[in-house]
Image (spheres, grey):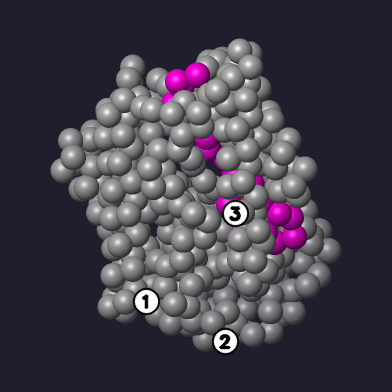
Amino acid sequence: MSRGALLSETRPEGLDELLDDAGADGWLLYDFRDQNPIAHELLGLGKTTRRAFALVPRKGEPHLLHHAIEGSAWREWRWARSTYRDWRELASGLRDLLEGMGTVAMEHSPGSAVPTVDRVPAGVLELVRATGVRVVSSGDLVSACHSRWSEQGLSLHRRAAGIVRSTAMAAFERARDAAAAGEPIGERTLMGWIADRLRREGVTEQVGCIVAAGESAADPHYEPAGEGESLAAGSLVLIDLWGGFPDGGIPADQTWMAVLGDEAPERWHEVWRAACAARDGALDLLCARSEAKAEVLGWEVDEAAREILRARGFGEWFVHRLGHSIDSELHGSGPNLDHLESRDERRLIPGVGFSVEPGIYIPGEIGVRTEVNVYWGPNGPEVTTPGPQGELLFFPVA
């Protein structure tokens, strides 16, 4: 969705149905100093320094309550508004704003199960509940109105995906050439090389990477100490890299694995193939549900991949969720594929995107991860990562 989507003269498609599904009479968006980036983006806000509430009711016109000094920040607001000056007027103004409301949806997640949606402070929830209004989670509204990809975002994502993939392959070649010359480079040096190349190719937003060799990859969010390990001949190397284009581009996020050599122990193949089986099993579930026109929840996809790893004896070594939402942020606010860190019960709806990235991390031995991105388009799930990896890649060191 575009910035300021809730300021459009046309209500976002499906909003009323989503409010019905949530059992809510309206969507109450709260922000303070960009404390709630979801509301900040949907309302197209600039700098704000005081608390504000914007109510989008299921029936009737939106209404705004903001501080008296913040008129400029809300110049694009086209509907009714009220202002407050002190805390007493804020409390009474909130009661007036919510008059007739029985239940409102807010960026709140019970038990903070989904942190990317849990944006409203507990004290603000107390203020709202003190008016007699019940609060439910806006999770599905966030998916539909905030985390859906625009056509421009999808187009720029596809461009970024090609560059991210080619950069990973070039990075393996760079490490191979250095090893062949007898001067293997360190993990940290290759990380810098990757980031520089992405930026030279125009992928300048939310750029980052992980390079992990051998046992280092058993730490999923590995950060080398100093220069890190040398990428010598025979190394098993994980490269996780990401970034996007500016002006509404959706970032791409991929993980690739290669051997700097022409052979690998059977154990490496065994672990890698198990991770790939989990990835492909998750993708198969997505396709099957799409073809059957059946609902699929984020946690179900995670569980499908996790069960495959359990059956192969690697379940205990898959220590993070299967995938994260991707929207304007690399780790977005839409549905995650998660039945470990949380039980994400949000539906995967057309227009959202996410990663699928099972990993196996055995401390002191090996770490592997395979990662692709998926866009849920009009015809179902589309893997946007070009040429997803099957077998381990080999870069022979001459």
User: In the image shown, does 130 or 288 lie closer to the viewer?
Assistant: 288
Q: Identify the residue position indicated by label 2 in the image.
A: 60
Q: Identify the residue position indicated by label 3 in the image.
A: 161
Q: Position of residue 143 (x, y in %)?
A: 49, 65
Foreground disc of the pair 3, 1: 3
Q: Is residue 107 magenta?
A: no
Sequence-wise, the earlier of marks 1 and 2 is: 1
Q: Could you tell me which residue is drawn at 68 percent across and 28 percent down?
A: 192
Identified by mark 2, the residue type is Gly
Residue furthest to the front: 398
Q: Is residue 48 left or right of residue 100?
A: right
Q: Position of residue 155 (x, y in %)?
A: 64, 66
Foreground disc of the pair 2, 3: 3
Q: Could you tell me which residue is drawn at 62 percent across and 46 percent down?
A: 166
Residue 359 position (above or below residue 95): above
User: The residue tagged with tag 3: helix, strand or loop?
Assistant: helix
Q: Which residues are magenta?
A: 233-252
Identified by mark 1, the residue type is Asp
User: The residue tagged with tag 2: helix, strand or loop?
Assistant: loop
Residue 350 position (above or below residue 69): below
Q: Identify the residue position indicated by label 1 in the image.
A: 21
Q: Position of residue 85 (x, y in %)?
A: 74, 58
Q: Place residue 145 in its image quadrant.
A: bottom right
Q: Place residue 363 in its image quadrant.
A: top left
